[in-house]
Image: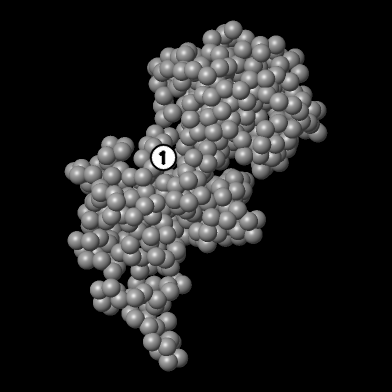
Amino acid sequence: MSGEGRRRRRVLLLAALVLGAVTLAVPGAAEGAPRPPAPAHEGPWPPSKVLAVDPSTVRPPRVVTPFASTCPAAPYGVQHTAPGGGKTVALTFDDGPGASTDAILAILEDNGVAATFFNIGVNQAVRPADVVAEATQGFLLGNHTWTHPELPTLSAAGQAQQMDDTNAEQTSLVGFPACYFRPPYGEYNSTTLSLAQARGMAVFNWSVDTEDWKADHSADPYWVNRIIRLGEAGGSQSHPVILMHNQPGAMPATVAALPTLITFYRDRGYTFVDLAGHVADRPVSGDWDGNGTVTPGVVRGNMWYLRNSNTPGPPDIVFGYGAPSDRVVTGDWDGNGTTTPGVVRGNRWYLRNSNSAGPGTVAFSYGGSSDRVVTGDWDGNGTWTPGVVRGNRWYLRNSNSGGPGTVALSYGAPSDRVLTGDWDGNGTTTPGVVRGNNWYLRDENSTGVGEYAFGYAGPTDRILTGDWDGNGTFTPGIVRGSRWYLRNSNTTGPGTVVFNFAP
């Protein structure tokens, strides 16, 4: 609802209360006037509920931000639809950064999903590392004011200060200001729109409201299911913009609902974009030329960019395969020693036996659309086949065909990030999980404890594995922006090989 619409609603509410012989103070009518409850508000009232600290304890940096010159031309008015052709969906998170930022980033990264974070200036000052992580990993940052006030109650100078202080804080942390703005509570007036446009910031509200803030930091299934139900309402729209939150306090219901919402839109063919129209880069790894060494790749949309050495440089192989809404997998599907692409659409797997454009060589159904997908040579016969993880239950199949899992085991926790590799070099792929920055790797496809446990990198890094040095053993790797950090042993320590790769 626009700021004008909200004001009309308040006028009607006030009139009804007066008729009922109830006297209320008009919001903002006088300095220091008491404020009545505001049920029309999108988020919690008062603004202090979404601030990590008392604003009087935090001062914005004195940074001159080159506003309009660094952003594309901003339209006047308010946008409510995700950019891009076909069906697109934009996930947006207000009020951060907060205690759930790391968990949200990990889910988005593991699903290869773009998103936009509208951060509050005060909260950025308290959690600067989270802001840097969001920007480094390619997520779009937006301006959500310094202290989350009701903007139409402020003077032009006051509104400008809210925008400018937040952009100054973001610039001090990541080197550039925001090009997108979301007014608190979705409320604005003509002054808001003019000030944002002058700063090169496009104003975006939303078309789908999950009302996840109402969970009030509860993890109760009632709230998880309610967030999912409201979030799925965008399935009737071609370009929904979904409102979620990332407030200072933990938001477990939002975190729990997010994977289901991603699955819902992915299964319906939506491409996930940020409000600038960008899709997420998805790092992959494989032995693309069959020389025994695993090297990097990036999937952007449906374009695959593969490099044959662990060094900086352009991709050696480029081709299109699959659709932007597909999940991507890699493996040696025919046992010839070369890794090639695969995509998973719903529960349908399409595997191709060459690194080139064309149809899938093998297609079959396995698992469910909400399962997490993994691949590996589970029986050591030289051919990679599918696996799915449901909660902490792993179902591995020894052929590229439909049918039940050949091996089932429990490993890790449902909230862990999952990966696979041949950790001991015996020719068989086995499971691993990452919890925070701790890696737990198991040498058998059976229930039990990990044989290896070590810390590597951080909880907001993109994770992958490979035999980076060709010695037959898989070890960890992470991607931070365009920077790849590959380690040649399953132990704590710095990256053995570090380079930039981004097509």
Asked whether 262 or 37 is in front, the reply is: 37
User: Crowdedness of circle 1 by 10 Å Cα count: few (<14), some, many (20+)?
Assistant: many
Taking the spot 46% from the left edge, 39% from the top edge, the residue there is 279
- Residue 490 is situated, as x and y percent measured from the top left of the image, at 58, 17
Q: Is residue 406 visible?
A: yes
Looking at the image, residue 150 lies above or below residue 366 = below
Q: Is residue 193 left or right of residue 23?
A: left
Q: Is residue 406 left or right of residue 28?
A: right
**Residue flagged by tag 1: what amino acid is it?**
Asp
Taking the spot 21% from the left edge, 63% from the top edge, the residue there is 156
Assign the C terminus to one quadrant of the image.
top left
- Residue 122 is situated, as x and y percent measured from the top left of the image, at 33, 50
- Residue 166 is situated, as x and y percent measured from the top left of the image, at 29, 49
Q: Where is mark 1, residue-wise?
A: 130
Quadrant of the image occupied by residue 12: bottom left
Q: How many marks?
A: 1
Looking at the image, residue 394 lies above or below residue 43 = above
Taking the spot 57% from the left edge, 8% from the top edge, the residue there is 470
Name the colour scheme: one colour
Assign the N terminus to one quadrant of the image.
bottom left
- Residue 234 is situated, as x and y percent measured from the top left of the image, at 54, 57
Secondary-structure class at tag 1:
helix
Q: Is residue 85 visible?
A: no
Taking the spot 70% from the left edge, 11% from the top edge, the residue there is 426
Asked whether 152 or 447 is in front, the reply is: 447
